[in-house]
Amino acid sequence: MNATQLPESHAPQTIEPVIGEADIDAAIETCGGDVRNTILSLLLALDSARRDASWGYVRGRPSRSVSGQEG
């Protein structure tokens, strides 16, 4: 192996996007075709998801109640 080759375990992985063109079109359509409103809605959803994720996990369980049930 020369310096330009990486072992398979260290080779960069290609990640397929989870969101496709149809998802983007559906989001814009849901917001009545208003791209600005679509972007605002997506940013608010992202912020909410980040706050939810920041609570973390304790022993494999959510550290706060989920859906009104104790976690």
Image (cartoon, rainbow, N blue to C red):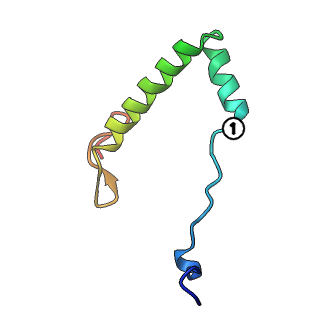
- Say if 67 sits above or below 5 in the image: above
- Say if 38 sits above or below 18 in the image: above
- Say if 59 sits above or below 10 in the image: above
Residue nearest the viewer, comparing 34 with 26? 34
**The N terminus is located in which quarter?**
bottom right
Residue at image location 38% in from the left, 34% down from the top: 67
Q: Is 57 left or right of 26, judged from the image as shown?
A: left
The x, y position of residue 40, in whole percent, is 47, 18
Residue holding disc 1 = 20
Residue furthest right in the image? 22
Q: Secondary structure at mark 1?
A: loop
Q: Is 56 left or right of 13, judged from the image as shown?
A: left
Residue nearest the viewer, comparing 56 with 67? 56
Residue furthest front in the image? 3
Residue at image location 65% in from the left, 28% down from the top: 24
Q: Is 59 left or right of 35, judged from the image as shown?
A: left
Residue at image location 62% in from the left, 23% down from the top: 27
The x, y position of residue 35, in whole percent, is 59, 15
Amino acid type at circle 1 is Gly
For the image, the number of numbered tags is 1
Residue at image location 30% in from the left, 47% down from the top: 71
Residue nearest the viewer, comparing 67 with 51? 51
- Say if 36 sits above or below 3 in the image: above
Q: Residues within 10 Å of mark 1 (few under 14, many from 20)?
A: few
Residue furthest bottom in the image? 1
The x, y position of residue 48, in whole percent, is 37, 30
The x, y position of residue 25, in whole percent, is 70, 24
Q: Quadrant of residue 13?
A: bottom right
Q: Quadrant of residue 65?
A: top left
Residue nearest the viewer, comparing 30 with 5? 5
